[in-house]
Image: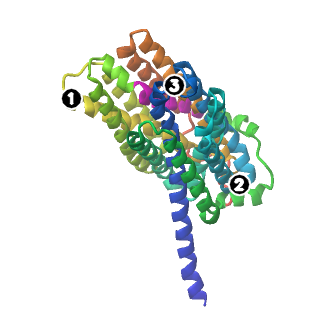
């Protein structure tokens, strides 16, 4: 009997870990789908004058969506550290799924914007909680890979949205119905199959109380916190700024529109490759050193893009490696958070990093758009991005070298 029990226990643990990986990755994929869906349908909304929508209305809706995501990311951390990762993730998925389903039913621009704002609250909570759960189901020496591999789901979701948008054309409502139904389906599976984080359970048994957000502001964590917040802000500024404006910047440089759109695809393919490679390197060589190298390489690649290139092959190689280093540098900041902070404050720390980074996701496209409107998008857009990468590098440089916070991991100390 003992041998049977001992052999079944690893099997159950293996199935539990498999479900955790699949469900967290799928949740991040849904976020990638959602954050691209609005950009995919804005041209159709404006062409058909849906609800009398103007370009200014579309900008307001897009901005409020990101504001909701930022608020959700910051708010979920303390709640997840108090109530549990599993409960908060399922609730967040249900929230954004329900309000996504009813977006096509909005009868005014104001209602459309309000629904996107509320959906954003749930959406913003999904990524930091998913990353926290994934990191806590992995050994400490594999947490960088856990973060970067989970984030490949984001780019997968973005690709799915793009492909569906090409198929549904003017029937944009289908995109929201698909996302809402898929999200509710994922939430049901999570309810039955997603286990609670053992690290969270141990932390609650050890402390028995809630750790407030102000814990991040104490001297033991403040130095790391400031560096993480600045690096996350700069990282997401680059990610959103490039994804939003790369085709226009390259078109302004003299490249034809089809080539400029293809370059955006190359950028994101590089992003997936960078996430996979970056996690492996960080686990072997150290997260801080790898993140510094990635931001430093991003500076070089972005500076190169400011130069007009006659060779299409050379240009695509530079764009590919820009994606490799820019996109994964941002996620490596999250990986540092999951290793540095103990379980009882980890979700709060990751939520704050994600939330402050989301402010960068709003600022980046706005500043780049202003440069484009002024007629100096190329090369000054890339000068701006290179300067931002320098600031990200300097922020990471201030982080403590250790990948473990001032307190040992609760329940795992030697």
Proximity of marks 2 and 1: CB atoms separated by less than 8 Å: no
Label 3 sits on a secondary structure element that is: loop
Relative height, residue 187 to residue 126 (above, below)? below
Magenta-colored stretch includes residue 81: no
Tell me the magenta residue range: 226-245
- Nearest the viewer among 228 and 123 is 123
Residue 312's mark? 1
Image location (x, y in percent) of residue 368 = 46, 19
Q: Position of residue 391 (x, y in %)?
A: 50, 24
Marks 2,3: beta carbons within 8 A: no
Q: In the image, which disc is placed on residue 394?
A: none
| Residue 340 shows in the view | no
CA separation, marks 2 and 3?
44 Å
Which residue is under mark 2? 84
Picture layout, residue 362 above or below residue 378 = below
CA neighbours of label 2 inside 10 A, class few (<14), some (14 to 19), many (20+): many
Q: Residue furthest right?
A: 209
């Amino acid at each position: 009997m003992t041998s049977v029990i001992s052999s079944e226990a690893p099997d159950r643990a293996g199935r539990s870990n498999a479900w955790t990986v699949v469900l967290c990755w799928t949740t991040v994929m849904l976020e990638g789908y959602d954050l691209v869906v609005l950009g995919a349908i804005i041209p159709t909304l404006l062409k058909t004058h849906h609800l009398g929508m103007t370009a200014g209305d579309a900008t307001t809706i897009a901005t409020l969506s990101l504001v909701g995501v930022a608020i959700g990311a910051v708010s979920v951390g303390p709640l997840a550290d108090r109530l549990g990762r599993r409960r908060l993730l399922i609730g967040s998925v249900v929230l954004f799924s329900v309000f996504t389903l009813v977006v096509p039913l909005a009868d005014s621009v104001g209602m459309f914007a309000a629904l996107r704002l509320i959906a954003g609250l749930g959406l913003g909570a999904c990524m930091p909680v998913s990353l926290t759960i994934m990191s806590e189901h992995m050994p400490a020496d594999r947490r960088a890979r856990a973060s970067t591999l989970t984030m490949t789901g984001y780019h997968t979701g973005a690709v799915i949205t793009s492909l569906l948008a090409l198929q549904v054309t003017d029937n944009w409502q289908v995109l929201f119905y698909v996302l809402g139904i898929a999200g509710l389906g994922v939430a049901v599976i999570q309810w039955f199959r997603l286990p609670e984080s053992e690290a969270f359970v141990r932390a609650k048994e050890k402390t028995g109380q809630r750790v407030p957000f102000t814990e991040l502001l104490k001297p033991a964590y403040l130095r790391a916190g400031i560096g993480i917040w600045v690096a996350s802000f700069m990282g997401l500024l680059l990610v959103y700024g490039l994804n939003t404006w790369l085709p226009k910047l390259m078109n302004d440089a003299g490249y034809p529109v089809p080539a400029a759109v293809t370059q955006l695809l190359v950028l994101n393919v590089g992003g997936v490759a960078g996430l996979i490679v970056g996690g492996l390197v960080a686990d072997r060589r150290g997260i801080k050193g790898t993140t510094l190298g990635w931001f430093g390489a991003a500076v070089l690649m972005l500076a190169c893009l400011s130069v007009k290139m006659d060779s299409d092959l050379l240009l695509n190689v530079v764009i590919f490696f820009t994606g490799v280093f820019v996109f994964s540098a941002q996620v490596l900041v999250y990986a540092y958070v999951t290793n540095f902070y103990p379980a009882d404050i980890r979700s709060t720390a990751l939520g704050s990093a994600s939330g402050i980074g989301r402010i960068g996701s709003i600022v980046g496209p706005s500043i780049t758009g202003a440069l484009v409107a002024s007629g100096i998008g190329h090369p000054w857009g890339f000068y701006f991005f290179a300067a931002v990468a320098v600031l990200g590098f300097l922020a990471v440089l201030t982080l403590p070298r250790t990948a473990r916070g001032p307190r040992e991991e609760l329940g795992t100390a030697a």
